[in-house]
Image (cartoon, rainbow, N blue to C red):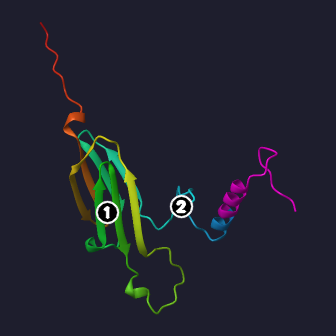
């Protein structure tokens, strides 16, 4: 048995498993973006978190998911987004030639900075994007200080 060793003389099972995963993904033309962790799943919606002067804006890509299938909860500075994308009826009873979409339930738990105010959260679903605005606590917002000239 010939073990592949890269950049050292020590065999790394984790590196070998990652290389195997990369080869399988290439074989089947899978592209899961930056997901490289052991528990990362491609079935989770993509999330963008943007810091603004007065708070944070979280965008979650949830195309095809009805508002009734989404749930948000926030405890301190941790927001949890749960949902379910139901299998589309148009696929039932048919053989798929290629199917890159996903269905099923998901949960994303995001840790935000301690400056967020969990009592000031607004959410809106529009065109398949869930937008969540979370305000910063007043005492932690930057304050403008006027400089007087004498």
Above or below, 42 against 113 in this view is below
Q: Quadrant of residue 106?
A: bottom left
Q: Position of residue 42 (x, y in %)?
A: 50, 65
Q: Quadrant of residue 91?
A: bottom left
Q: Secondary structure at mark 1?
A: strand
The dot on residue 129 is: 1
- Compared across the picture, whether 95 is left or right of 129 comes to right
- Compared across the picture, whether 48 is left or right of 56 comes to right
Q: Which residue is mark 2?
A: 39
| Residue at 80% from the left image edge and 51% from the top image edge | 5
User: For mark 2, does the 10 Å Cα neighbourhood hold few (<14), some (14 to 19), or many (20 or more) residues?
Assistant: few
User: On the rendered image, what quadrant is the C terminus found in?
Assistant: top left
Q: Secondary structure at mark 2?
A: loop
- Compared across the picture, whether 5 is left or right of 93 comes to right
Q: Nearer the viewer, residue 35 or 118?
A: 118
Q: Which residues are magenta?
A: 1-22
| Residue at 58% from the left image edge and 67% from the top image edge | 30
Q: Position of residue 47 (x, y in %)?
A: 39, 56
Between discs 2 and 1, the one toward the N terminus: 2
User: On the rendered image, what quadrant is the N terminus found in?
Assistant: bottom right
Does 11 lie within the magenta span? yes
User: For mark 1, does the 10 Å Cα neighbourhood hold few (<14), some (14 to 19), or many (20 or more) residues?
Assistant: some
| Residue at 46% from the left image edge and 74% from the top image edge | 101
Q: Quadrant of residue 143?
A: top left
Above or below, 130 against 51 in this view is below
- Compared across the picture, whether 121 is left or right of 90 comes to left
Outermost residue on the top side: it is 150
Outermost residue on the left side: it is 150
The dot on residue 143 is: none
| Residue at 65% from the left image edge and 61% from the top image edge | 22
Q: Position of residue 95 (x, y in %)?
A: 52, 89
Q: Is residue 62 visible?
A: no
């Amino acid at each position: 048995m010939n073990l592949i060793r890269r950049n050292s003389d020590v065999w790394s099972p984790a590196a070998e498993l990652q290389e195997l995963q990369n080869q399988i993904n290439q074989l089947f033309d899978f592209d899961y973006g930056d997901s490289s962790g052991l528990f990362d799943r491609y079935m989770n919606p993509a999330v963008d978190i943007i810091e603004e002067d007065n708070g944070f804006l979280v965008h979650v890509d949830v195309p095809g998911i009805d508002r009734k299938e989404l749930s948000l909860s926030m405890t301190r500075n941790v927001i949890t987004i749960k949902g379910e994308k139901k299998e589309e009826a148009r696929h039932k009873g048919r053989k798929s030639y290629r199917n890159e979409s996903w269905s099923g339930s998901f949960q994303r738990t995001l840790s935000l900075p301690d400056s967020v105010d969990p009592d000031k959260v607004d959410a809106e679903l529009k065109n398949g994007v869930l937008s969540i605005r979370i305000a910063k606590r007043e005492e932690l917002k930057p304050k403008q200080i006027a400089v007087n000239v004498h």
